[in-house]
Amino acid sequence: RQPSNRTPANYQHPKQGQSVPPHLLRKRDGLLPIRKALPIWPQAATIKAALKKNNILVLTGETGSGKSTQVPQFLMNEPWCTKCIAITQPRRVAAISLARRVAEEMGSFMGSQSPAAKVGYSVRFDNATGPNTKIKFLTEGMLLQEMLRDPIMSQYSAVVVDEVHERSVNVDLILGFLRNLVSGVENEGNKKRTHPLKVVVMSATADVESLVAFFEDRQASPTQGQTADKPAAQREGALARDEMTKEAEASRVATCFVEGRQYPVKTIYLPQPTQDWVESALKIMFQIHYKEPLPGDILVFLTGQDTIEGLEKLVNDYAEGMDKDVPKLLALPLFAALPQHAQQRIFQPTPFRTRKVILATNIAETSVTVPGVRFVIDCGKSKIKQFRNRLGLESLLVKPISKSAAIQRKGRAGREAAGQCYRLYTEDGYKTMEERTTPEILRCDLSQAILTMKARGVNDVLNFPFLDRPPREALEKALLQLLHLQALTDTGAISDQGLKIAKFPLTPTLGRVLVEAAKPERDCLLDAIDIISALSVENVFLNLVTEERKEEAEEARRELYRREGDHLTLLVTVQRYAEEETNRKLWCEKHFVSHRAMQNVMNIRKQLQQQCMQLKLLAKDDAQDQSAPSEARSQAILACMLRGFISNTARMMPDGSYKTLIGNQTVAIHPSSVLFGRKVEAIVFNEFVFTGKAWARGVSAVQLDWVSEVVEAIM
Ligand code: ADP
């Protein structure tokens, strides 16, 4: 394990056995009354008793009632809890900020080697855990990776699955694996746990009934796990025959409900629907600011990083022009890819005579509780992943949210006092929203999920215990996709290559690119890592609003542009940035590149390099030496891209349009591409974007015969 440097810079690590410095203890003691006032506090004894008797607890409670921060602390000293407690989060921001908070509440260090470092976190491309970590926050993806390495989860006494109501694909997989694990269905290599694993399933809104039924189904036949289809009466009969051994009793599912505190929130709708909700948001924000007294921060729900950054700039520009006697307005972005220090700013107290405006994605819906908010502005939309079975493509679409999400968003305004929620849609618009958000597993590409299942030894994916069974068509599409990537063999078993791909915290497509790039005949792994790092953040190039600025940016970026397309342009950008030693921020400004995004890119790049070393795809010395790619290497890089993105290839038609080779869908090169307006015989691209028509974004030119060759090989 790496020693961590996550503690503050002015901090002296106590040596082994030395006690915690007094200021941490003071902080801890100061937070105790706040913890005691949380709605969950009086339920500590109930929760402990439930888990003493049972192995599974379904705990529901409103956002902010203290589930994520308190439950692990309640459990950590229980006699059965001799090892670590894992708490999963759908997002890295939440995992990190919760770990920090819990460390503060316990007067503990974070993730260091010190015996006093009881709290840590593990998120993709960032690990802050130490040998004494007792409470570990991790993203769902990281827990799944750990489950692949250690199927019986031997380092944990308990797993707390948080935010289950979000119903990400990963949560559904985790629940399925845990169900099999606690019921003894999965017993890989005949290894058995010495103590039962305790499982806590937590959610803000979830349907308790279905979760309980999901976990209890197995009771009819605790060893087989094939009971899902048996009628209830038969299951009960089987249960009676089992004579309810002590173990069976412990595996009953306990439930607990924590009532939250909520002040009234007034809802204000737009009288007319609007297309331009960014402008509406801006207008309402300033209205609130001029009209409403302090304190009272504003939380704005937007769709993604680009809209957030655009609005952040507008707010700052307008705020600069405000009279001196008007309080200040402080815009703070909050989205998943935001670097840590920027995330922490939302938890800091609002400065004197200032109003905070937090510009967030749906991350602030239930995952992160932002203090001080009295006003919510809800654009009524969110970006969701949607898989189109017919086309075999997944894309990010901006879609209306569900009523239950709208209610959650509104609730954020009434946590500390009565509040107001401005909905940037009409009341009729609200009425047409779906009741609930469709679980991700029913609408997204399942290839990563299935690869994970296969890597965990689940061969019959069609009969896996899913909380909601995905359509058969989607499962088959995903299997086919994995076959195309050669992650599965012809018989559907996982291939050696597939096992490698599953070990990367990347989509199978990107994992496949890396595995290809590591082959001696390609020899371009470092370049592929650079490109994939850049693809893993939302926007490397700043999104510019005015035509004039766009032209300026074009000019400044020209030296980075490569005629082969966007992938090599990204590569050049990453390499130049990395070489820039004096002032990277200035370099970014000069080239209209997002410094924030590039900091993330560098971090991801380092982690991917390390991971490739661990998988023995890369030798340590290699990572130091990287030259600008020659013509031949550029071609090798694109060939690797092609190997992963084979579904995202298109050829030019006689009329100059492009049609995908698989699926025969018409696409156009997105205006953000360096290839926009150029005509090339074939393209490979990262993603489809649908705005009015189908666009290919992140595009490179490739030779048609290469594409045909790869397509033919897999068809
Ligand atoms: P739940 O899981 O029920 O939504 P949490 O345990 O996340 O509740 O939050 C309980 C309280 O702790 C909330 O009032 C929240 O504002 C506060 N809190 C959580 N994380 C942080 C943090 N990083 N900094 C400051 N306060 C926090």
Image: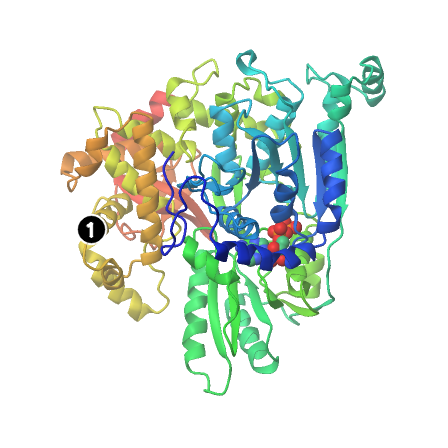
Task: Say which residue appears at 75% left-offset and 27% top-offset.
Answer: 216
Residue at image position (45%, 78%) is 319
Residue visible at 31% across and 58% down in the picture: 595
Residue 512 sits in which quadrant?
A: top left
Q: How is the image coloured?
A: rainbow
Between residues 391 and 126, which one lies in front from this camera angle? 126
Depth order, front residue of 189/508: 189
Is residue 598 visible in the rendered image? The answer is yes
| Front one among 562 and 36 | 36
User: In terms of image quadrants, where is residue 524?
Assistant: top left
The picture places residue 644, in percent across and down from the top left corner, at 36, 32
- Total labels: the figure holds 1
The image shows residue 173 at horizontal and vertical percentages of 58, 31
* Whole-percent x, y for residue 428 in the image: 70, 63
Residue designated by label 1: 576
Mark 1: amino acid: Arg
Q: Is 300 on the left-hand or right-hand side of 710? A: right
